[in-house]
Amino acid sequence: MFARRITAVSVISAVLVVGAATAAFAATGNGTNLGVGSSSCVGPDLVENQTVLETGSAFKTGTMTGASAKWSIWASASSNFNTATSVAGATAKTIDQFYVPPANQAEYVWGCIYNNNTVAIDYSIAINP
């Protein structure tokens, strides 16, 4: 009986440690009053042989009314955003999009939002390898 409890505690501890390590690699952000024609990005995260997921949502500033925005994932061999290229994109109120980098190639990735509305927006964004 005592051995089973130790095993169960060990398994739970291992799951918590792995979960904490996984969460540490996510880049997240949120903001209010993102002006028309403005953008915001999170990252970079260095990935290799991992699928990248971008999630987020946008609302008209100060409301719970969804606002469509342009979402994109950018990637580069360098951590310099100026060398990055757009590898995925969509226009939506909420986003849940994937990017699969080339096999055995390390890349830096960013998740970005661009406000293409006629009003300011509030947003949340995350990119998770």
Image: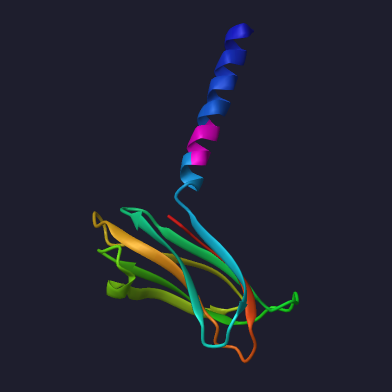
> What x and y, as percent, mark residue 14?
50, 29
Identify whether 38 is placed above or below 82. Answer: below
Q: Quadrant of the C terminus?
A: bottom left
What is the quadrant of residue 104 in the picture? bottom left
**Camera sees residue 54:** yes
Which residue appears at 30% of the width and 74% of the height? 82
Q: Is residue 60 shown left or right of residue 127?
A: right
> What x and y, as percent, mark residue 72?
45, 74
Which residue appears at 34% of the width and 55% of the height? 46
What is the quadrant of residue 6 in the picture? top right
Q: Main secondary structure of the magenta part?
A: helix
> What x and y, as percent, mark residue 9?
59, 21
Q: Residue furthest bottom?
A: 118
Write the start and end of the magenta stretch as one range.
15-20
Residue 120 counted in the magenta span: no
How many numbered marks have been drawn onto this rendered protein structure? 0
Which residue appears at 65% of the width and 81% of the height? 67
